[in-house]
Amino acid sequence: MKKKSRTRILSIFLAVLIVGGGLVLYRLGIFSQKNPEPGASQAAAKPTAMLSARTIPAKGLLIQSGAVRDAISVNGSTTANEVVMVSSEVPGKITKIFFQEGSFVKRGAPLVQLDVDELKAQRDRLVVRQQLTRSIAERLQGLYRKEGVSLQEYEIARAEADQVDAELALIDVQIDKRTIRAPFDGLLGLRQVSEGSYLGPGTTIVSLVNVNPINVEFSVPERYVRVADKGTRVSFQLDGVSKAYEAVVIAKEPNVDATTRTLRLKASAPNPGGQILPGAFANVQVSLRFFDNAIMVPTQSVIPELGGRKVFVYRDGKAVSVQVETGIRQEEEIQILSGLQAGDTLIITGMLQLQGGMNVSLTEVIGGGS
């Protein structure tokens, strides 16, 4: 009986030992398959094959070269070519106003007449004295030639006649100053005086503005001081007006503003109809450089990467990665200095999905048909 019990216990112990050893060997991988199934390698290669066979729809741009202007955009304001507050040098009562508010006047046109009755009376008196002194001087000149009078007597008479002439000229100047005239061609503003009112020296009568040509004043950053100079062409637009106006820089400040580090410039533009008013806000485009045969591409088509930039070009149905060198940047485009040439087809959409060598189907080619 004891012998059977020992045999049973030994059998159970051997069974446990065999099972435990098998588990250990399984964990160590001895009984696992060393070679993968044939389908496993095909499954691993399947994504790569699918990627290479995938076709990406995209839009293309046919590269063309053309003239490009490099410019900066700054804020400015329009100013009058000439502006003055018309006033009188001398006092007097206004007897006549010749102008209409808001009208255009030519240089020298009379605007206001002051009272000149007293001055005219003085002038009439001087005219009588002038005639008398001239007659005396002429008579004494004849007697002096005949030695009837001395040289001193003749010179005194001649001096009196000349003095009357000078006093008469002074009266004429005073009378002329009482007619206030337009100092230049321009548009008149609102009248500040009325007939019958007394006008003191320096009292404003009306504003006069010359707006043809119109000036545009603006400032450029310090780094553009040597580029934006006298003769530089600029264009500007006004708020609410789609038209672009052309102007030429005619003057600049002699120094850079130490606070803003900018240089103040003035440009002039023709304004024959007076459509551009002084004091208006202007968005000024300042021309810096001009390129005859520049290649410009959409900014989003250029992909930055470590060490440079690249684009994708469509060639034989595939996307080809091309390293490029860029130049000036505008609002929506960037210049390509090297890497592209006229006739290339640039891929401009779907760049995030593209890789070099992928199949591409162009849905549209801008500049070259569909």
Image (cartoon, helix red, strand yellow):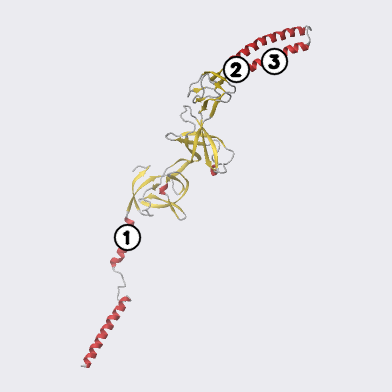
Quick one: label 3 or label 1, which is nearer the N terminus? 1
Q: Nearer the viewer, residue 247 or 276?
A: 276
Amino acid type at image mark 3: Gln
Q: Which mark is residue 175?
A: 2
Task: Report which residue position mark 1 lands on.
Answer: 47
Image quadrant in which the C terminus is located: top left
Distance from Cα at disc 2 to Cα at disc 1: 103 Å
- For the residue labelled by badge 3, is the local secondary structure a helix, a strand or a loop? helix
Classify 104 as above or below 342: above
Task: Report which residue position mark 3 lands on.
Answer: 163
Distance from Cα at disc 3 to Cα at disc 2: 18 Å
Amino acid type at image mark 2: Ile
- For the residue labelled by badge 1, is the local secondary structure a helix, a strand or a loop? helix
Which class describes the residues within 10 Å of circle 3: few (<14), some (14-19), or many (20+)?
Answer: few
Residue at the left extreme, as displayed:
1
Quadrant position of residue 24: bottom left
Point out the frontmost of discs 2 and 1: 2
Residue 17 locus on image (x, y percent): 28, 83
Amino acid type at image mark 1: Pro
